[in-house]
Structure formats: C-alpha cells, structure tokens
C-alpha cells in the first residue's frame, strides 16, 4: 500500500511537471532579471568564501600540524562534549518545559515571558552576563554561596572541567527558550481528541507523554536536534565570551581554536583547517537531516 502511494505521488508529480508552461520572451527575461541578483549574491557570499576556505585547507600538512599540536585533540573532545551534552540536555529540557508552559494559567504566561528573555537578548550580552556571574566573590554565584552557606566558591575558569561545564550551562541557558517555543507550538497543534481518547484508554500523566505526545513529536524532535547540532558545532560566541578558552586553551572548541590560529597566531590556513576538520561530522548530519525532511514530506 505504501509503495503504491509513493508511485502514485511520483506519477502525479511528473504529470504536473509536464503541464507546466515554459517561459518565453519577456517572461523569460523578467525571470532572469530577478534571478541574477540572488545568484550573484549567493556566489559572492556563499560559494566563493566556502570554496576559498576549502582551497586554503586543502594542504595535508596542515592537518598533520594540527594533530601534532597539544591543544587539538583536547579541543576535539571539548567540541564533542559541548555539542553532545549541550544539545541533548537542551532539547530534552525544552520538550519537558513546553508541557509546563502549555497550562492555561495567567502566572505561567508571565513566567514564559520572563523565561524567553535570555533568548531575546543578543548572544554577546547574554554570554558576558553569564561570564561576570562566575567571576570571583563579586560574581553572583560565588556571592550567593558566601552569603547563604559561608563558603568560598571555586575559581570557575581556572579548571578545565568547571570552565567547560560553564560553557555548556551558558549555552543551554541561552538557547533552550527558543526550542521550548518550537515544541510549545507543536504541542498546541495536537488535537485534543487524541488526548481524550488516550485518557479513556487509561493513558494519563507520564503515560500520556510517553505513548501519545512524544510519538507525535518524535520526528520534529529529531529534526530540531540535528539542526541544533549543526548550529552548535560552529558556535563561537559562547566559549569565546564565557570561558575565553581558558585556562591555557583547555576549554577551546574548534570554532574558537580556528580563530586563535587565524588571528592570534597569524596562521589563517591552519585556522581554516581546524574548522574544516569538523566536516566529517557535519556532512553525515546534513545527509540525515535532508533524508528526514524528504521522508516527512512524503508522509504528509
């Protein structure tokens, strides 16, 4: 049945394509006139920079130099932890909180407005605010620990794991509201009749979430996770402004390490190679994301 449906859709699309009128004369000229500026902008700001970056990073000796550097392998580990932990914790908490904010109570609406503030402000201001909250006794976190418990807080950015954890928490704090709104909008589109039927069958509370809500949102959840992972691999602002890559470069990720090589050390080709070394991870994510989008289109 599924194969027959897909065959019917393919035949119907070919039939529609055969009936599309071809552009001639003035219509074709107008189409070219509108397409040329966008094509020129795309080539100038996407194709050329990316092609030039690939050309700069095409020398195999650059990657040998990267691997020989003591910072590169720890940076790979930091990037995997930053992306893996940050994205998955953020998406899971966003999914759970979307159910909380779905409740029709006025104080929850007010709380939602406050909750989205970290996402609404610029990333630079949000990360700098988080950085200063962790700076010594004058920072908010250590100050609260001193006042409430009479203890001195740690020096957050003098330890690799504390610094890396601070980067991850700041990243989650900044971007979780955005994905919460996405899941909240998706939950609002689920028909109430489905929940009523599930309640009759005994699916309430956590069982309703496990057997009804999550299966309906599973495809969206996967797509959002893949898209967020793509964005997070190239996240530069969080690490650069929260921990600064310290101490001694032990919390660098690939985006910030490439910046250090290109601008601080004066080796732009090595910096581009550091960033491009993430392509073996990015390309499979892009392929899976495109395939999932195609599958979703067929299912709809």
Image (cartoon, rainbow, N blue to C red):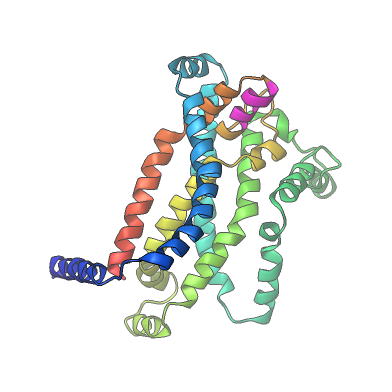
Residue 99 makes an appearance in the image: yes
Residue shown at 69% from the left, 60% from the top: 120
Question: Considering depth in this image, is 90 or 287 the residue closer to the camera?
Answer: 287
Residue 15, image x, y percentages? 20, 71
Residue 97 makes an appearance in the image: no
Question: Considering depth in this image, is 283 or 203 the residue closer to the camera?
Answer: 283
Whether 194 is drawn above or below 28: the answer is below
Q: Is residue 211 left or right of residue 122?
A: left
Residue shown at 35% from the left, 49% from the top: 288
Whether 250 is drawn above or below 64: the answer is below
Residue 23, image x, y percentages? 35, 66
Q: Quadrant of the N terminus?
A: bottom left
Question: Considering depth in this image, is 133 or 274 the residue closer to the camera?
Answer: 274
Residue 55, image x, y percentages? 47, 26
Residue 93 is one of the magenta-drawn residues: no
**Residue range (magenta):** 256-264
Question: Considering depth in this image, is 67 or 104 the residue closer to the camera?
Answer: 67
Q: Is residue 47 left or right of residue 300?
A: right
């Amino acid at each position: 049945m599924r194969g027959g449906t897909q065959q019917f859709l393919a035949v119907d699309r070919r039939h529609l394509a055969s009936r599309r009128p071809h552009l001639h004369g003035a219509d074709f000229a107008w189409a070219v006139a509108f397409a040329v500026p966008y094509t020129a902008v795309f080539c100038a700001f996407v194709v050329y920079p990316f092609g030039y970056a690939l050309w700069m990073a095409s020398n195999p000796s650059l990657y040998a130099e990267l691997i020989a550097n003591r910072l590169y392998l720890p940076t790979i580990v930091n990037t995997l932890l930053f992306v893996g932990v940050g994205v998955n914790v953020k998406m899971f908490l966003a999914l759970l909180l979307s159910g909380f904010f779905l409740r029709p109570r006025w104080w929850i609406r007010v709380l939602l407005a406050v909750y989205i503030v970290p996402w609404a402000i610029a990333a630079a201001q949000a990360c700098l605010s988080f950085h200063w909250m962790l700076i010594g006794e004058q920072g908010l976190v250590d100050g609260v620990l001193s006042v409430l418990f009479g203890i001195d807080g740690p020096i957050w950015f003098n330890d690799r794991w504390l610094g890396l954890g601070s980067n991850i928490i700041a990243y989650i704090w900044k971007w979780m509201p955005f994905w919460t709104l996405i899941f909240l909008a998706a939950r609002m589109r689920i028909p109430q009749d489905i929940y009523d039927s599930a309640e009759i069958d005994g699916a309430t509370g956590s069982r309703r979430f496990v057997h009804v809500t999550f299966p309906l949102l599973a495809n969206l959840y996967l797509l959002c996770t893949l898209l967020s992972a793509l964005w997070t691999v190239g996240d530069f602002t969080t690490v650069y402004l929260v921990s600064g890559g310290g101490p001694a470069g032990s919390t660098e990720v690939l985006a910030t390490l490439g910046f250090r090589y290109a601008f601080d050390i004066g080796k732009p080709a090595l910096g581009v190679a550091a960033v491009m070394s993430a392509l073996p991870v990015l390309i499979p994510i892009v392929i899976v994301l495109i395939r999932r989008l195609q599958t979703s289109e067929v299912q709809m």
